[in-house]
Image (cartoon, rainbow, N blue to C red):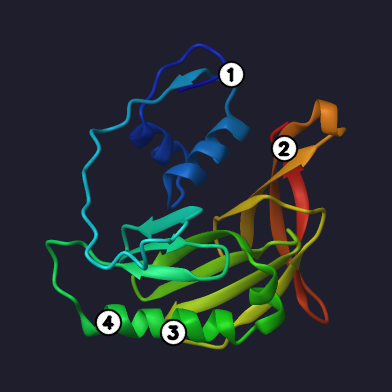
Amino acid sequence: FEALHGHNTSTFDDTLSAGAMSDHGGALLQHLGHNQHKVTFALSTGELVNIQNWPTAFARPVDLACHRDFGALMVLEKYAVHVLQEANGTATKDAHLLQDNIDRCIFGETDFQGQGIRSFSLQCEAVEHCSLWLLAENGHQLLRCPLSPLGPAEMMELKGGPWRAVQIQSHQELWAWRKMGALDDERDQIVLLRRACHQQCDFLPRRDLD
């Protein structure tokens, strides 16, 4: 696709270098926020992945997450997250343990889980430091589930919502998407939020890409 910011052509690899961030989505956002260029991205050929443990025939996934530093593919339903395994792979104890840890984190926050989950993001600062971040259906609450190393769940509030989706950049920053304007004239807005801790930790809007 093309970002309407000028006349240069690039690839995701170039953008990733320019953004110096850990994921393609975050790099794209940072690149467009700091560079007045038109960028055309060439995506590599897709790879078909067969899943051996699809949750149920009635599953209705609404989001998908994976990370190159964390060997797992996850799908989000409204009330749960499922860890998937490739059909040509072997079931591992780690995958079952990961599912148990995610379930314990989500279902341990009954008020959060009961309203549903709108979006999620898997973020890794290193192979040994990965967390799953989940946005509540109300668009205001964010739950962090540490996966490696394991740790207690952390509940935070996202100011300026309701938000529709989040993309975690680091433990201190995230990008969030919301709809702005009247119902008959809505427009998308992508905003950078940064963490601020006083009596509790919240994320506050700092700038947008409007």
Helix or strand or loop: what does disc 3 sit on? helix
At label 3, the amino acid type is Asn
Q: Report whether residue 171 is seen.
A: no
Mark 4 or 1, nearer chain start: 1
Location of residue 125 with respect to 47 vertically, above or below: below
How crowded pointer 4 is (Cα within 10 Å; few <14, some 14-19, many 20+) is rated as few
Mark 2 or 4, nearer chain start: 4
Q: Nearer the viewer, mark 3 or mark 1?
A: 3
Q: Position of residue 144 (x, y in %)?
A: 58, 74
The residue singled out by tag 3 in the image is 101
How crowded pointer 1 is (Cα within 10 Å; few <14, some 14-19, many 20+) is rated as few
Q: Position of residue 189 (x, y in %)?
A: 72, 37
Would residue 97 appear left or right of 15 to someone viewing this image?
A: left
The residue singled out by tag 2 in the image is 189
Q: Quadrant of residue 209?
A: top right
* Gap in angstroms between the C-alphas marked 2 and 1: 16 Å
Q: Which of marks 2 and 3 is in front?
A: 3
Q: Position of residue 70 (x, y in %)?
A: 33, 66
Q: In which quarter of the image is residue 66?
A: bottom left
Q: Where is residue 19 in the image (x, y as percent from the top left)?
A: 48, 41
The residue singled out by tag 4 in the image is 94
At label 1, the amino acid type is His
How crowded pointer 2 is (Cα within 10 Å; few <14, some 14-19, many 20+) is rated as some
The residue singled out by tag 1 in the image is 5
Helix or strand or loop: what does disc 1 sit on? loop
Mark 3 or 4, nearer chain start: 4
Instruction: In this rendered view, identify the residue nearer to me: 130 or 98.
Output: 98
Location of residue 85 with respect to 43 vertically, above or below: below
* Gap in angstroms between the C-alphas marked 4 and 1: 44 Å
At label 2, the amino acid type is Gln
